[in-house]
Amino acid sequence: MVKISYQQKSYRRVMMETYGGKVFASPTDRTNFGRSVLEKDPNSPGSLGIAISEAVEVAATSGGKKKYSLGSVLNHVLMHQSVIAEEALKQMDLANEYPEVVIGCVGGGSNFGGLAYPFLRENLKNGKRTRLLAVEPTAAPSLTKGIYAFDYGDSARMAPVVKMHTLGHGFVPPSIHAGGLRYHGMAPSLSAFHDAGLIDAVAVQQNATFEAAIQFARTEGIIPAPESAHAIRAAIDEAMDAKAKGEKRVILLNLSGHGNFDMRAYEAYLAGKLEDYEYPAEAVKEAMQELPKVKIPA
């Protein structure tokens, strides 16, 4: 478990331990790569890229006793998740509506892809004009600030090289309270669609995100996960824009998780302790120096 999430999302860790799981804070001292990270930075908050590297190393050195399954940034995962939107299409039919805007939070891509891809199909095959909006944190802005290039899927460079929007495989994001979105890259298919102009992306600040989450909780009675709250922020902004323009706008968003185990994040927001962070373009440019050199056949 990424160290900062291990600390911030402790109740999720406790639930796994209640069911008999053993959870370690990454970077750990249990892998060669984890130890190398800690040697350089003993206080590293960790990242999804580092945790993936450690998990891959454990599986690769287990003699076949352990398996590793990656579940967000790979194309087949997004396709499997798209059952969500197939159901949403039928729900829209029942309501006799169709969305002008489809919104999902985005870190690796499965959340957004699961809701957006069938609507993208409808755009491409059946002439629909739904806007597909991916929402990411300003602290991990791979779509809005990242470079579309070949990169590794993990920090130790053990995962396959894919072409994606990336902030660099060495990216270690700030300690924002949306651990599921703290990743350096984006799914290859989603990146290609964004590069082709088929989907839009926007980055939102942490405090504005929690402001929307609080509004949603007090209106709907559901406390959303910090990750899902990014989509809520964008949906509220879309609704207010439609109101200002006097338009009817059907907005579909993906509420993908509750925040009942994220109350420390809400406590910090209510106490005014959350900080906004804008990832600098200079850091992205510097990270591009470490991209793998890939030769594409003519």
Image (tube, helix red, strand yellow):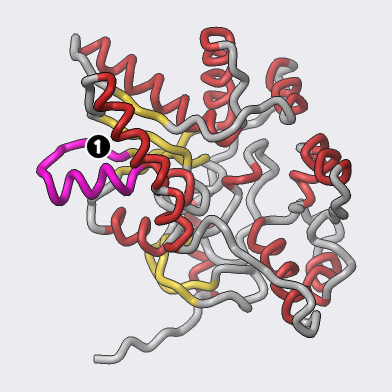
Determine the image quadrant of residue 49. Answer: bottom right
Residue that sits furthest to the left in the current view: 127
Q: Is residue 287 above or below residue 209?
A: below
Q: Of helix, strand and loop, which one carries label 1?
A: strand
Left or right for 72, reference 54:
left
Tell me the amino acid under the disc marked 1.
Arg
> What's the residue at 77%, 27% (across, down)?
264
Span highlighted in magenta in the image: 116-132
Position of residue 2 measured from the top left corner of the image (x, y, whole percent): 74, 52
Question: 161 or 55: nearer the eye?
Answer: 55
> What's the residue at 21%, 20% (across, down)?
96
- Taking the magenta stretch, the answer to whether it contains residue 130 is yes
Q: Is residue 30 above or below residue 87?
A: below
Question: 258 or 278: nearer the eye?
Answer: 258
- Taking the magenta stretch, the answer to whether it contains residue 81 is no
Left or right for 292, reference 52:
left
Query: Which residue bears the numbered disc 1?
Result: 131
Neighbor class of circle 1 (other Cα within 10 Å; few <14, some 14-19, many 20+) is some
Position of residue 249 measured from the top left corner of the image (x, y, whole percent): 24, 19
Question: 291 or 131: nearer the eye?
Answer: 131
Determine the image quadrant of residue 135. Answer: top left
Determine the image quadrant of residue 76. Answer: bottom left
> What's the residue at 76%, 37% (across, down)?
9
Position of residue 84 measured from the top left corner of the image (x, y, whole percent): 42, 41
Q: Quadrant of the C terminus?
A: bottom left
